[in-house]
Image: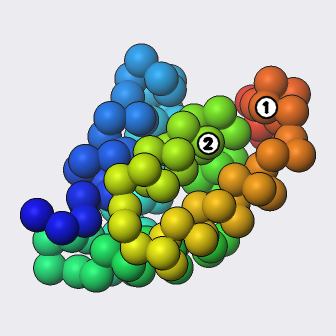
């Protein structure tokens, strides 16, 4: 099949009503739907390699603020394991390295107050 579809094969398994409250889940899903149109990273008629552009964008940073550091790391690790594109792997590694300095519990607490 080639590369998995980011929203349908990866995000849908990580961002669930069990992992995130409904308000933030809805907000994340709306942001991701817009991002798929904007960046064209769908495996169905798009270019999956453009996922790297989304990951390095301010739109993905906004997603991090919505879902928190822990879920972001989980999502990125699954992306890293499931995509063969070096461009995507490099983007994931860059973000994970940047997130490594944050204490996830403290950061998630701060995000809850925003």
Name the quadrant containing residue 102: top right
Depth check, front residue: 105 or 79:
79
What is the distance, in whole Å, between disc 2 and disc 1 at their CAs? 10 Å
In the rendered image, residue 5, in percent from the top left (x then y), is placed at 25, 59
Position of the N terminus, as image quadrant, is: bottom left
Q: Residue at x 77, y 56 (%)?
A: 97
Question: Mark 1 highlights which residue?
Answer: 104
Task: Say what secondary structure mark 1 lies in.
Answer: helix
Q: Residues within 10 Å of mark 2 (few under 14, many from 20)?
A: some
In the rendered image, residue 77, in percent from the top left (x then y), is placed at 52, 45
Are discs 2 and 1 less than 8 Å apart at CB?
yes
Name the quadrant containing residue 15: top left
In the rendered image, residue 61, in percent from the top left (x then y), is placed at 67, 60
Q: Residue at x 37, y 67 (%)?
A: 84
Question: Mark 2 highlights which residue?
Answer: 73
- 105 vs 63: above or below: above
Name the quadrant containing residue 49: bottom left
- 57 vs 9: above or below: below
On the question of residue 71 being in view, the answer is yes
Q: Residue at x 23, y 50 (%)?
A: 8
Q: Residue furthest top?
A: 18
């Amino acid at each position: 099949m080639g590369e998995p579809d980011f929203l349908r094969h990866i995000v849908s398994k990580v961002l669930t009503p069990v992992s995130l409250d409904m308000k933030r889940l809805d907000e994340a899903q709306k942001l991701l739907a817009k991002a798929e149109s904007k960046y064209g990273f769908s495996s169905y008629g798009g270019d999956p390699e453009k996922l790297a552009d989304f990951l390095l964008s301010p739109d993905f940073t906004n997603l991090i603020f919505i879902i928190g550091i822990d879920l972001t790391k989980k999502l990125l690790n699954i992306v890293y394991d499931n995509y063969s594109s070096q461009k995507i792997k490099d983007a994931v590694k860059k973000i994970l390295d940047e997130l490594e300095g944050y204490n996830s519990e403290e950061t998630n607490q701060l995000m809850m107050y925003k």
